[in-house]
Amino acid sequence: MTTALAAPAPTIVNGVNVSALFETIEAVKANAEIAKFNFRAKNSWMGGDRNRSTIKEFTGALAEQRTGVQAFIADNGEPDVLLGEDNAPNPVEWLLHALIGCMTTTTAYHAAARNIVIEAIDSELDGDLDLRGFLGLSEEVRKGYQAIRVRMRVKTKAMPETIKALTQMSPVLDVVSKSVPVTVSVETY
């Protein structure tokens, strides 16, 4: 009688397949090209304060990803006080969403890789923005956020300093806190 050997069950920590995570790390170590990703979005103005972004395909792990599936749609708007109809979050609110979403996922994944169990993560964040920059009324006031404050509550046995260090691995935190070069080209028709 022969017994087939079953593949070992993957190690799951914080809902993350750590076995697959470490396999990915080893694959990237063997071929750095696997780590190169290009994310894309399209946007169309819908009049007034409304515009819509469509997010679908991206390139990563040496292939085109998310093909043949439905795109994600995200609407942008403005609140009444900013002359909008308040039908969707405005772009600076979406930025807060992107920031905390990335910081939360990053924390959970990096904790899982270190076998740090996290039972819950709850966050609040807010940012200060002075319209004088956007309106061109002051060159001393930046157009975007002057400051963003993130308050995370993490249910874990790990020390706060350890968890804070994991949050610093967030790609969106890196973009927001250190900025990134943006090239803009415009054509009219």
Image: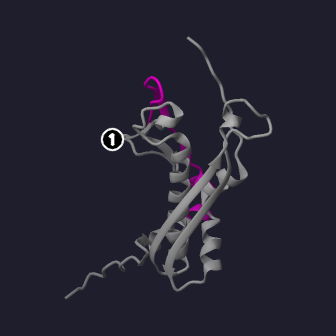
From this view, report whether residue 149 is shown above or below residue 144.
Answer: below
In the image, what residue occupies the spot 66% across and 29% down?
184
The span shown in magenta is 27-53
> Residue placed farthest to the bottom in the image?
1
Q: Position of residue 121 (x, y in %)?
A: 47, 71
78 lies left or right of 140: left
Depth order, front residue of 20/117: 117
Question: Residue 27 at x, y = what percent?
Answer: 55, 63
Which residue position is annotated with label 1? Answer: 70
Residue 157 position (above or below residue 187): below
Residue toward you, 51 or 125 = 125
The way the protein has been coloured in the rendering is: one colour
Residue 159: image quadrant is bottom right
Give the secondary structure at mark 1.
loop
Q: Amino acid at mark 1?
A: Gln
Residue 87 image position (x, y, % from top left): 39, 37
Quadrant occupied by the N terminus: bottom left
Residue furthest front as drawn:
81
Q: How far across and how far down the image is residue 97, in percent?
A: 50, 52
